[in-house]
Amino acid sequence: MTAAAAAAAVVCALAGCAPTAAKALGHSHTPATPTARATPTAPASSPPASPAPLLPSSGSPAPAAPAAPQAPAPFITPVPAGTVVAQGDVASPKGSIHFHYRMVSNGDDTYSAQYSNFTDTAPIPISVTLLDTPPRVGDGVTYHGVGDHVLGGPTSTAAVPSSTNIGTAPSYLVALVTYSSVASADGVPVELGPGKVLAVTSVHWSVPARQTNVHPVDGGARPLAGGDVTATTASGAPKSYRVGHGDLPADVADRFGITLQDLKWLNPGSGAFDPEGNLYEDAVLNLDPEVL
């Protein structure tokens, strides 16, 4: 190495620069250029998630808000089994026929007619039926009504009690009709002939209201529920509603303070709803649970 090269190396060392490999081997006399050092950057990261709020007293995370309670399913309870809803005594005008009747709940929304102490001194078998329009004694029975039932023939003592089912909601049947059920008019007085009415007894019903959790109250016409209440109950509650133009089921239910589930429950198989659950305009909806 020459004196000049040695001097240059000393200067470079004092300046803080390192000779390149080429220079160290003596292949170049050009001093190396210092390399700039990049400043490291912190890796990008998302902000930390906010912790759940803490309960002031315990320092534990606060519980999630409770879900809204589901509306209870609509129901109506039958009149208890054995409840007597009508009763009375029957005596034909000529005094040849006597018996006692009771109309009793079966506990499943159906009712039975029970007959006891039946006696008959007329020479013919006797039947009874319930009608919504009372005939007159001496008329001929052309419609055998509801609960048509044979009580029996001539007796010397009271017959064994008997009964028959008379279906649901029977209080519209206002007349208990006693009539001749003889098969032929041969040898029988005209007034005792087949189907002749022998006694007509008014039936006075006392059916207690059933318990329900559905109580519609009319909140007044509004957009999407602007139809008319077409009937009310004895207490003034809405009984039926005619669907207006543009009415929506949920809005109609809301107008009467009930749920859509309640509204559909009140109208099973009514034909008021189309297959998609929309309402047909001018359809009449039931709002009275007692009709069910």
Image (tube, helix red, strand yellow):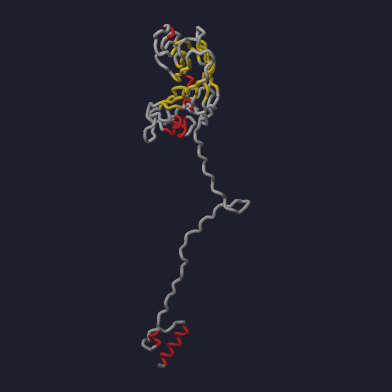
Q: Position of residue 242 (x, y in %)?
A: 41, 25
Query: Which quarter of the rendering shows the N terminus?
Result: bottom left
Q: Position of residue 54 (x, y in %)?
A: 58, 52
Count of numbered circles on the image: 0
Can residue 175 be seen from the camera position used here? no
Q: Residue at x 44, y 72 (%)?
A: 38
Q: Nearer the viewer, residue 263 or 132?
A: 132
Q: Nearer the viewer, residue 8 or 193?
A: 193
* 249 sits left or right of 107 in the view: left
Q: Nearer the viewer, residue 159 or 89?
A: 159
Q: Residue furthest right?
A: 57
Query: Eyeballing the image, is 182 above or below 80?
Result: above
Query: Eyeballing the image, is 61 above or below 104?
Result: below
Q: Position of residue 229 (x, y in %)?
A: 45, 24
Can residue 275 be seen from the camera position used here? yes
Q: Nearer the viewer, residue 258 or 211?
A: 211
Residue 147 in which image quadrant? top left
Q: Position of residue 277 (x, y in %)?
A: 39, 34
